[in-house]
Amino acid sequence: MEGTVGSAALLPVTQTVEFDTALIRKLSQLGPRYTSYPTADRFNAEFGYRDYLQAVTGATARGNMHPLSLYIHIPFCESICYYCGCNKIVTKDRSKAANYLIYLKREIEMQGKLLAGANQVEQLHFGGGTPTYLSDAQMGELMQHLRRWFNFAPDAEGEYSIEVDPRTVTPERVHSLRRQGFNRISLGVQDFDAEVQKAVNRIQPESETVAIIDAARAAGFRSVSVDLIYGLPKQNLQTMEQTLEKVIAADPDRIAIYNYAHMPHLFKPQRRIAEADLPSAETKLDMLALCIKRLNDAGYIYIGMDHFAKPTDDLAIAQRQGRLHRNFQGYSTHVGADLVSCGVSAISAIGATYSQNVKTLDEYYEHIEQNELPIARGIKLNMDDLLRRIIIQMLMCNFELSIASIELAYPITFNSYFATELLKLRELEQSGLLTIDEEWITVTPKGRLLIRNICMVFDRYLASAQAAKADDGATQPLRYSKTI
């Protein structure tokens, strides 16, 4: 178990978030999740392979590369979960994964050569799809290939995580994953209720999930995380209460509770969900309130957004110490790491750039065969982007912002540069979301659940889009989920 050193285990659990139904009902709106700023919908096709090369070679030449965070995208799944909005390929044809691995290894090799001398990895995350769609042998070979081209920090220092579907792994496979170098594991659960599982086409007995959690403990994984979703078809307060009771009894280190965003216009599998089976907006709020209360009573700390962790978990410790970071994989303890991502649709963040790979297998293979990284689009950040990015990071991770620290780091006077934003923040202050004084912007316990609303104030691109909408009367595309 992690977090047993120092005084962290002695700290009392305090109420760090307050649920205000009326306030949430009043202020919840469509908005970004801010796993990046600018958000991915601001990336453009003008940024390509050569721009990425320039960013990497420029950073390595100046000695500005940070330790790396690696993300590996495995897009395959055996079956479709109706709620899913991920970039995935549902197939039982295992030869497709074998072919994908050939090209993925070539991309990893290209990245490794490009980053030679600046390839120290402190964080690794396998996502998808279902990463454990790969066989044990395939995963072992892929991990060996990664170590051939990158230098990994020792197990005790690095954070090496993998998402698993408990339906597709055995306890023996979990032990093998630990031997292959993974030390954190995340399990998709969503809901334990049989009717809910049937409605989303994900039949997953509780015993199956608990067996994998127990295996992870026995194998020596430093952290076990469980993902839940509220707002699914057939869910109600009773089913959510029962699921929470079972999850808390399983005692994971981290729990993520995601709001199901029903957007069938964007995600085709969601068209199989009967809208009549979805809980009402009122019931969803009640479920969220229940989740917060039950997890707080069970001793979990609210980290931010959808995430809870034990007080002794690295995430909770990093937040108390001001070291928490947020990237495309969610919250992280590795501040400032450059993110290198491989696989279809994967997004990298090097220095003042973001870049995203192509989204289809055919395009991906075509680029690799031409011996070039499969980058489809991206963006170069200017000073204003960097300034707003750090502000949003601080608010999302620490729920407070030192005005003086921003003025020391950037050539601005905060009150004049953000005069318009401060007027909007004052309105949120009157609603009880935050407090503002000469030195600090501090998010209140009531405001923590609505942190996306607060960060949206600093989003220049969002403000420009809203202004354009007001000018021409156009409707904004429904590409965002509700902030609550």
Image: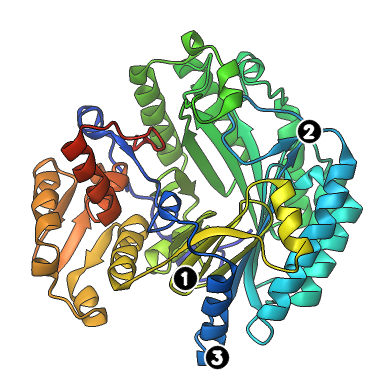
Whole-number angstrom distance, CA of label 3 to CA of label 1: 22 Å
Q: Which residue is mark 3?
A: 61
Q: Which is in the foreground here, disc 3 or disc 2? A: 3
In this rendering, the answer to whether 319 lies above or below 77 is: below
What percent of the width, then of the height, locates residue 75?
Answer: 71, 45
Give the Cα separation between the discs numbered 1 and 2: 35 Å
Inspect the image, locate mark 1, and give the three-letter code of the amino acid beneath it.
Val
User: Is residue 69 depicted above or below 30 in this figure?
Assistant: below
Mark 3 touching mark 2, by CB under 8 A?
A: no
Residue at which label 1 appears = 335
Q: Is residue 99 left or right of residue 233?
A: right
Write the residue at 34% across / 64% down: 389
Q: Which one is nearer the viewer's eye here, 208 or 306?
A: 306
* Residue 298, position as x, y percentages in the image: 47, 39
Front residue of 83 and 386: 386
Q: Which residue is mark 2?
A: 78
Disc 1 is placed on an element classified as loop
The secondary structure type at the circle numbered 2 is loop
Amino acid at dot 3: Ala
